[in-house]
Image: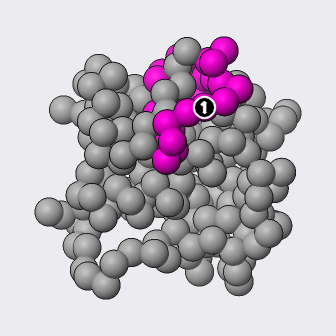
Amino acid sequence: MSRTVLYMSMSLDGFVAGPNEGPDNGLGDGGHRLHEWFFAGADHKDHKDIGKLAGVDGDVWNEAMSTGAVVCGRGTAEPAGFWGGDHHDGVPIFILNRNETGAGTAQWPLVTFVSDVKVAMTEAKRAAGGKNVLVHGAGTAQLALAAGVLDEIEIHLVPVLLGQGRRLFDNLAVEHIELERTRVLDGAGATHMHYRVRR
């Protein structure tokens, strides 16, 4: 059965982007450090240029890239240039956007704008053909957790303290969300921690 899985690189102090994040500085100042674990050996800073990663890092990367659909917010997709309309392997991309319009993206048939996180997750699961759904972005994660539609969380914990920037779980309601740890893997550049969201 298809599951929605958040895959996020995060600093030890909880940041997923550095300060001064914006359209031309998508990961903020110093935020690229969080992605060094999977860019090892890549010629460019585009995840499509990544070669075969060794060991645990490679296993986790391949798992993320075997998903059947992607859900993210516009704040994640836009700085990435909407991945040129193809995040990986031609899978559908569902982008949370309040007005459901995507000016300038008509040339990308895989990209669909959706205004509601529950609808986005339901449509992505349907489109994923039994594979998991890759979820990106702090805002999307927070909305999905609040709506009860995020099934699992994979944190790539990077051994760095950013000190400031965007935190992954800053805007959650004051309530406990219980998680069940299902695995911890030590990679060369990050510790990969997988959790199931308990409901």
At a point 27% along the width and 36% down the height, the residue shown is 122
At a point 36% along the width and 38% down the height, the residue shown is 120
Total residue callouts: 1
- The question of residue 9 being in magenta is answered with no
At a point 31% along the width and 30% down the height, the residue shown is 123
In depth, the one of 193 and 25 nearer the eye is 25
Please, is residue 105 above or below residue 36 in the view? above
Residue 195 pos. (x, y %):
31, 60
- The question of residue 96 being in magenta is answered with yes
Q: Quadrant of residue 126?
A: top left
Q: Main secondary structure of the magenta part?
A: loop
In depth, the one of 192 and 116 nearer the eye is 116
Residue 70 visible in the shown view: no
Residue 19 pos. (x, y %):
76, 73
Residue assigned mark 1: 102
Q: Which residues are magenta?
A: 85-108
Query: In the picture, which quadrant includes the N terminus?
Result: top left
Tell me the kind of residue under disc 1: Gly
In depth, the one of 5 and 138 nearer the eye is 138
At a point 26% along the width and 51% down the height, the residue shown is 149
Residue 75 visible in the shown view: yes
